[in-house]
Image (cartoon, grey):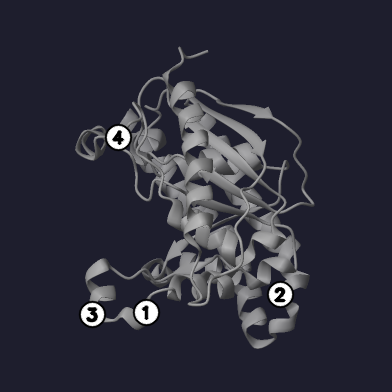
Amino acid sequence: MHLLLGVVSAVILVFLTIACGGPAAILGLIKLAFPATGKTFAPAFEWLVVCWSRGFTGWLSLFSPAITVEREGQFSRTKNYLIIANHQSWVDIFVLLIGTNRTIPSTRFFMKRELLWIPLVGFVAWSMDFPVMRRHSREYLAKHPEKRGSDLATVRAACAKFQQIPVSVVNFSEGTRSTVQKLAASKSQYTHILPPKAGGVATVLAAVGDHLDAAVDATIHYPDGVPTFWQWMCGRAGRMHIHMKTVELPEVGALNDNGQISAESRERVKRFLEQRWTEKDQRLGAPPA
């Protein structure tokens, strides 16, 4: 029965992706031909994403426990936010979409460049101005030191269009999905999450921090265990909970003479994330409601 439900859910996901992604792709082609229309189509793109996410999660909620949302602070759909969240599963993306729906502007996720080649999805993500990153390894940077700092330029260019409409930019600050194995290998000072990496947040703040109004600290919790995306589609996921809290952003100063983020700014961002992660760890360790 679970397998049949998973197959039906997959068919519905494909149908919704085509039904909502098709019109979005058409708008994207128009935007490609006439770039000035990007701002005009922004509400339509957001509406299509909401229809896609609400349609799919609405279907799954018929067979899975509802996702509970807890909010702390003031939220607005006309302000710009940086969302910092813990990361455990692909399901996190849908939990975030549900938690932020009609509360703050639509979310934009930083994408790896390779994801642009996914049929339809990649083009729609480009059309919606999702920031695309090309990250260089330490080995590559050692051979090509002139590429250091290129991430900052990439983020600045990717986020430049965010100045036209209110948006919420998502950063999974752990840099990867947290698992039991990764926790053990990392020797993290936290019990339930990997240590946050300050580089990504510092880069975003240095690039477009003056256009962001606040941060949203999002803590995603699965009290019955972290589900895989397939388990959720099969109706075998347990309870899901997201806590969202607005907090002030740390100040990131001007770039130094080499065009890099100063050590003081990086340290300020590091302390900010450590405070947020300490609260997250305590929240994730609390008995489920």
Disc nearer the start of the sequence (4/3): 3
Residue, disc 4: 188
Within-10-Å neighbours for mark 2: few <14, some 14–19, many 20+: many
Relative to 235, is 262 on the left or the right?
right
Dot in front, 2 or 4: 4
Residue, disc 3: 143
Residue 31's place in the image compared with 122, above or below, is below
In three-dimensional space, the C-alpha distance between marks 4 and 3, rounded to whole angstroms, equals 30 Å
Amino acid type, residue under disc 2 in the picture: Gly
Within-10-Å neighbours for mark 1: few <14, some 14–19, many 20+: few
Dot in front, 2 or 3: 3
Residue, disc 2: 38
Disc nearer the start of the sequence (1/2): 2
Amino acid type, residue under disc 4 in the picture: Ser
- SS for tag 4? loop
- Residue 281's image quarter? top left
Q: Nearer the viewer, residue 54 or 166?
A: 166
Relative image position of residue 258 (x, y in whole percent): 48, 77
Residue 199's place in the image compared with 247, above or below, is below
Amino acid type, residue under disc 3 in the picture: Lys
Disc nearer the start of the sequence (2/4): 2
Residue, disc 1: 147
